[in-house]
Amino acid sequence: MKQIIVTLAADGSMSAESAGVTGPACLDDVALIQALVPHGTIIDSKLTSAYFTQQAPTSDDQLAHNEEQDRA
Amino acid sequence: MSLEVLLIPLGIAAYAAWRESSSTDLCEKCKSTRITDQSLLVAAVEALGATGIVVQDGRVTGRIAANTFTFQRVGEVYLGRIDGADDAVTSDFLTHLEARVGSIVQAKNVDIIRQRATEMGMILVEQTATDGSVQLVFEEARA
């Protein structure tokens, strides 16, 4: 289950994290976070280790891989 | 988690603008704040017990205890001082002001984000407060 975790510091600053999504799909969460916090301006962002988590290849990925091997 | 973002709320300047303003001499003996929003500044000085507050475009004056204060917008942020006082008195006042601004902005944004989440169909599954910070955990509603 995807989660958005928003932390509001005592000095008024805010940070937000997406959790439960690995890989590039989490980039879609930037728009979700911005929609959730429309009165905040994103000044920094970073990918965490979960972004780079290996995902099981899809059948399309495997097909493309096989085609590359055939061409080689 | 796989993505983290840092946000600056409305009414508060990013660090660069705050730092840049501290070098100006347009407001004599004033020290920089990170406040960009005049209504936020007024709310904060009121919360500190200020009286006789006069609000003009880009300028806020008033009285706190036995002193008067002046804030002047310079560029993006407000600079302020305790009139006729030592730098240390102004610094102490602005430290308290910044803390009050933080708590006002935090409380306001908790309400706004919770309301926005409801509008977006997200569910608040956890709210915790630790060391002055408030953490909200939302999940997308199941279809």
Image (cartoon, coloured by chain):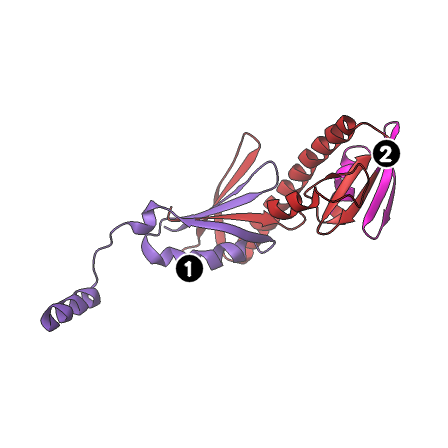
Chain colours: A purple, B red
Q: Nearer the viewer, residue B32 or B115?
A: B32
Q: Position of residue B30 (x, y in %)?
A: 78, 38
Chain assignment, label 1: A
Quarter residue A71 falls in: bottom left
B42 within the magenta span: yes
| B42 over B85 or under it: above or below | below
> SS of the residue at dot 2?
loop
Quarter residue B91 falls in: top right
Mark 1–mark 2 Cα distance, whole angstroms, equals 50 Å
Dot 2 corresponds to which residue? Answer: B83
Q: Residues within 10 Å of mark 2 (few under 14, many from 20)?
A: some
Dot 1 corresponds to which residue? Answer: A28
Q: Position of residue B13 (x, y in %)?
A: 65, 47
Q: Nearer the viewer, residue B64 or A59?
A: B64
In the rendered structure, which segment of residues is drawn in magenta? B40-69
Q: Amino acid at mark 2?
A: Asp
| B19 over B57 or under it: above or below | above
Quarter residue B62 falls in: top right
